[in-house]
Amino acid sequence: MSRLPPSAKPYTLAALGFAALILALGLITNTLDTDRYYWDFALYYDMAEHGLTGNDNLIAPFVYRFATPLLAGAIARVLPVEHTLAVSASSDGDVFFTSTYTGFVVVAYGAAIMQLLSVYGLARYAGARGWRAVVPALTIALSLYNVKFLLFDVARPDHLAYPLMVVAMLAVFERRIVLAVVISCLGLFVREFLAIPLTLLVARLLWETWQTRRWQPLAWAGAAVALGAACVLAPRLLIPIRVSGQYLDPLNQSGAELLTTLVQTPLSRRRWFNLLFNLASYTLPLWLLLTPGRLKTLWHGLAGWHFDLLLYTALVLVLTLYGGTDIWRFVTFLFVPLAIALAVVLRAGVHAVEVLYMLGATAYYNKIFLNIPNEIGAYLDFYGGYDLRVNEATLARVAQLAVLGLGAAMLRGLLALARRRAGRVPASSLDRV
């Protein structure tokens, strides 16, 4: 038997570990009651079952994310397993039956493993090694909407978007222009957030053009814009839709409706509250580990990444602001800067007890060991921060964030006290840890 090259061994072991973790998460995750409510999943099941041609039930923007449902449908048709699922066909209580569920399950589990493996690779790219490279991937695995939710509601398009995003961003960082463009353009048929690496690539090429006064980067930027625009516009111009449910839709909204959405959305205090709440919730693992000293270390450790990560974050927040109701799922695309930031902080040195507390707090806050409710009210309040919904459940979640943050501070205090008593670290250097 041939031995694996040294560079492949960490990834092989990580892949096996992540596969076991995903299977374990699947065992403790309940399944969505697909015939109870008429939600987004019904439209993806419909595409997987009936395709795009001659389908009179195509709705924007869901139809433009056709890659995942079509792939799931193709996989289900070749699998020697039959599983018929009843799915809501309308808000009136009608149902249709699909045999594509098994295909979505294969995509969900396979893409979840690829997501964690890609995050592991991203952490190693940011300089983390050993267990420190595993921690960012574990953190993403314990974030509700990156993995658990997609095992609960398998008929979502996001599965493939996460690993594609990492590959595209690594291609941008390494100036692999063709790879970045190809992956981003393919990803646009999965999730609109894959426009972000393409935007970063174009920004980098334009800056290179300005610095070098050479025309080649400008030509590459033009080609990237043209191909990206074609992949965005072609489905929207060629695929007939029954109706548009898109929050901001320049092609199907009147000028007055479009202007109203553009202006009124950022004026909504409730939307801003939920956006900031979800941002704080998703980045909980990072700020549980941060201290003033580590924040400085993080800033210096990200030297050379500042522009890319700030622009990436800004684009995610803009797309989230105008993306629609599921703010909690949109902010998960901050997983790229989150993983990189965690890798930089961890490689600088964090006590293992703090890391364990962070992982435990993340699992607790994201309710990893609880069932996701199938009843609409409990479902919306399970994580909190849905659209404009602000209620007692939201305030309780904010209080949880505060308590977990206080717990992290107290833990660091106890660790500092223990070090002082042991005489291992001079008291004057504790604030630099």
Image (cartoon, rainbow, N blue to C red):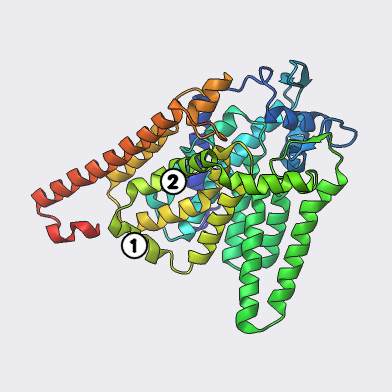
Q: Indicate the secondary structure of the residue bearing disc 1.
A: helix
Q: Which residue is mark 1?
A: 297
Q: Which mark is residue 319?
A: none
Judge from the rendering whether residue 335 lies leftward or rightward of residue 297; answer left or right: right
Residue furthest out toward the right: 54
Q: Which mark is residue 283?
A: 2
Image height check: is 203 above or below 142? below
Asked which quadrant contains residue 369, the reply is top left
Quarter of the image with the C terminus is bottom left
Q: Position of residue 103 (x, y in %)?
A: 71, 31
Amino acid type, label 1: Thr
Residue nearer the viewer, 348 or 36: 36
Amino acid type, label 2: Thr
Counting residues from the N terminus, which is met first, the one under dot 1 or under dot 2?
Answer: 2
Kindly tell me whether residue 33 is visible in this rendering. Answer: yes
Q: Position of residue 196 (x, y in %)?
A: 63, 56
Query: What residue appears at the point 39 percent right and 63 percent down from the top-left corner?
Result: 299
Asked which quadrant contains residue 68, the reply is top right
Q: CA distance from mark 1 to mark 2?
A: 18 Å
Image height check: is 155 above or below 191? above
